[in-house]
Image: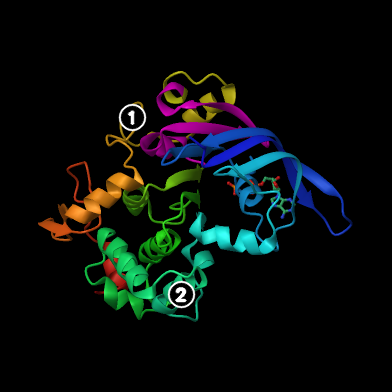
Amino acid sequence: MNEILNIQVLHAGYINDEGTVTPILHDINLTVQPGEIIGVVGGSGSGKSTLLHSITMLKGTPIQILEGTIQYNGLNLREINETERRTLMGSGIARVFQQAYMSLYPLRTIQAQCKELLDAHHVPVDKGVEDFCQMLAHMGFQEPRRILAAHPHELSGGMAQRVAIALALVLKPKLLLADEPTAALDATVQKKVLQELLELCQAYGTALLLVTHNINMAAMFTHRMYVMHDGRIVESGTTSDVMEHPQHEYTQALLGAVPILNGPLPKSNLKFSIETKEQAQIHQAHGHHHHDAQGRHTHDGMGFHSHDDRNLHTHDGRDTEVYHE
Ligand SMILES: Nc1ncnc2c1ncn2[C@@H]1O[C@H](COP(=O)(O)OP(=O)(O)OP(=O)(O)O)[C@@H](O)[C@H]1O
């Protein structure tokens, strides 16, 4: 099976106006299998965002690949042209930023932005908007269609980030790059939004590369993790191995530096197995039960499922204060 992402011996840096490159990433080797949830963990300035920039090579980012290969589903990303890159970004590889407002245009309604994205990738708009609304419903919006008419500033931070997540996933990408997707949110909402993000990824069979400075947060949700320090991967392995037997002193420092939220050692929250796209389609065909905002058992056609007893679909007070549905 092809890896969804295969980075080998990557060296990269930023190029300045004089054409000089400052190397930032050194000898990065990283793989993501279809549907895998991978954490990239490290402190500020360790190079996590630079790694994502190297994958997306967005216009305007002065990134320069010095050496190595980056393959998406067998395709060498260093060899594709700008048009191919634009097609791939969104439909194959999508990205969620720390601030929802980096993903959303302030002056356009959510509906306009969703339609524009679908149109640009030749996806039937009605079906795409329907999928989008179902994702919003899964993330706690009681009347998702009403959100379509809203502008981003009418949403709270948590709601705006949920909209950004649904937009990133509406084209059902194979890989989602999430750069500290919950760091800007209230601590009480962070875990919930991350859980919702994971459930959506699993429903769509989307692999996730989750970048975070919080090793404990990564531990709760990922299958494997890579620890970055000073532009290098200093440790990698299954999440349970890294958490229970951290080899590198930097990993040990990260573990000591971050407050432990739930007991002495966070255990992986991945009680569920990875759902393939085919399984998701079967779920879609048969419909699926989940809890609605009131905690009632409801039925939908999305294949979403929650596996713990917490009601993941209620509004937090902070969100409803800002946006009343
Ligand atoms: N556009 C740029 N030009 C030059 N250097 C940059 C640029 N962006 C980031 N850097 C440098 O690259 C290094 C890695 O930064 P990067 O943003 O990738 O780290 P990070 O792990 O994502 O940190 P944080 O968690 O604070 O976002 C830092 O030394 C930073 O100063």
Compared with 318, 289 (above or below) is above
Residue 293: quadrant of the picture: bottom left
State whether residue 193 appears in this view. Answer: yes
Q: Is residue 301 left or right of residue 38?
A: left
From this viewpoint, which residue is outermost toward the right? Answer: 18
Residue bearing the label numbered 1:
267
Q: Earlier in the sequence, mark 1 or mark 2?
A: 2
Residue bearing the label numbered 2:
113
Three-letter code, disc 1: Lys
Q: What x and y, as percent, mark residue 151?
A: 41, 78
Q: Nearer the viewer, residue 144 or 121?
A: 121
- Label 2 environment density (alpha carbons within 10 Å; few <14, some 14–19, many ≥20): some
Residue 325: quadrant of the picture: bottom left
Q: Which residue is painted at 40% across and 66% down in the image?
A: 160
Residue 28 within the magenta-colored segment of the rendering: no
Any mark on residue 51, and which?
A: none
Q: Which residue is painted at 34% across and 74% down in the image?
A: 126
Q: What x and y, as percent, mark residue 316?
A: 26, 59
**Magenta stretch in the rendered image:** 213-241
Three-letter code, disc 2: Gln
Q: Which residue is painted at 38% across and 55% down in the image?
A: 186
Residue 232 within the magenta-colored segment of the rendering: yes
State whether residue 312 appears in this view. Answer: no
Front of the two marks 1 and 2: 2
- Label 1 environment density (alpha carbons within 10 Å; few <14, some 14–19, many ≥20): some
Q: Is residue 200 left or right of residue 17?
A: left
Dot 2: what SS?
helix
